[in-house]
Image (cartoon, rainbow, N blue to C red):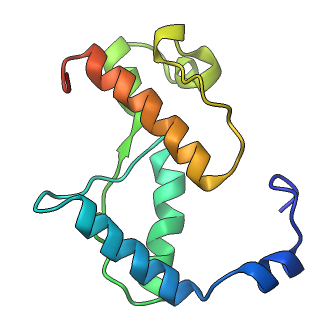
Amino acid sequence: MAVVGRTLEEFRQAGREPAAVISEFAAWVRKVSENGKPVFIGFNAAFDWSFVNWYFDTFQTENPFGVSALDIKSFYMGMAGCAWEQTRSSQLPSNYRSEKTHTHNALSDAIEQADIFEKMARGVGIIK
């Protein structure tokens, strides 16, 4: 809470019921992925996926991502042939870094991570 500058009381007043939110999230993921299988991608996907999956499991909503995720740090490690220590965002070459500011806001951080992964995927020809 200190990272985002809000108190627990603020979250209690402004927040929504987790069951409704996670259900809406699942519906949105299915909608935007159309007939394709959605893939959870994150910069340290194991960490982020575990939280998302906990909400799906706890509020009995099927996880549209299944039981796996694609980790951007691991992807870069394989792509660049580098050591794990070189996968930190501060260690990435400038052509893979995002111009977006890391804010610890879930949405803006997700957009930043998508930007990083898109650059890497373009770099290896997965997307044009």
Position of 13 with respect to 63 (left or right) is: right
Viewport quadrant of the N terminus: bottom right
Q: Residue at x 80, y 85 (%)?
A: 13
Q: Residue at x 41, y 72 (%)?
A: 25
Q: Is residue 75 above or below residue 14?
A: above
Q: Image point 49% across, 63% down: which residue?
A: 50
Give the answer, above or below, for where 20 lies relative to 91.
Answer: below
Q: Nearer the viewer, residue 35 or 51?
A: 35
Residue 21: percent from the left, percent from the top? Answer: 51, 80
| Any part of residue 66 in sight | no
Circle count: 0
* Residue 89 against residue 38 in the figure, above or below: above
Image x and y of residue 14, in percent: 75, 80
Figure quadrant of the C terminus: top left
Which residue appears at 85% of the width and 76% of the height? 10
Q: Of 57 and 81, which appears nearest the observer?
A: 57
Residue 6 in the image: state x and y as whole percent.
86, 65
Left or right, residue 9 beside residue 100 = right
Q: Position of residue 87 (x, y in %)?
A: 52, 23
Q: Relative to 97, is 9 on the left or the right?
A: right
Based on the displayed image, in which of its 4 quarters is residue 114 positioned? top left
Q: Is residue 37 visible?
A: yes
